[in-house]
Amino acid sequence: MRPLLAERGCTVSPGVRLRSLAEVVDHLGASGKTGIVDGTEVRVRRLAAGRTDREKFVSGKNKQNAVKTMVVTDGEGRVLFCSPTKPGSCADITHSRQLGLVEFLAQGPAVEILADAGYQGLGGRPAGG
């Protein structure tokens, strides 16, 4: 039986496997490559009636039941990281903060990351914090 993809990691060159978001940031900084980050939604079936967190899965953007994941690629389009899923109502910027992207970028090497407007203010403090 083959291990899960997350355990195997992402092979970017012979002998180099990336298994975490921190390793991806370090790799991008060491290689001088640009990273691209974006959130994507995957439509899912509606949750059972009576489930207390049912409304969390309704995406405000697409008005459908969904889960959201954050994907990081390099400039050539190779997937370097795909996060665990969150309910569809979770904003891109919130998901990235929960994954620790801000801390990894602040503590790691200088990295250029391209992102859409959903990540505007990523370096700032969260509301109420």
Image: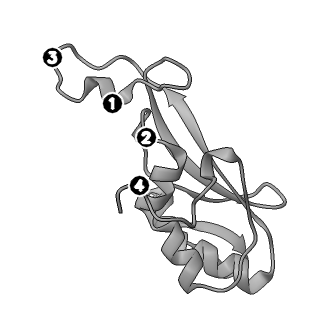
Q: Nearer the viewer, mark 4 or mark 2?
A: 4
Quadrant where the image shows the C terminus: bottom left
Q: Is residue 22 above or below residue 83?
A: below
N-terminal of the two: label 3 or label 4? 3
Above or below 52: residue 12: below
Q: Mark 4 belongs to which amino acid?
A: Ala
Are circles 1 and 2 on residues that touch, CB within 8 Å? yes
Residue appearing at x 30%, y 24% in the figure: 55
> Which residue was labeled with disc 2?
90
Residue 23 image label: none
Q: Please report the residue visible at 55 percent of the width from the left and 50 percent of the height from the top.
A: 70
Q: Earlier in the sequence, mark 1 or mark 3?
A: 3
Camera-nearest residue between 16 and 98: 98
Question: In terms of sequence position, does the residue under pointer 4 or pointer 2 come before the other?
Answer: 2
User: Would residue 78 be found to the left or right of residue 21 on screen?
Assistant: right
Residue type marked 2: Cys
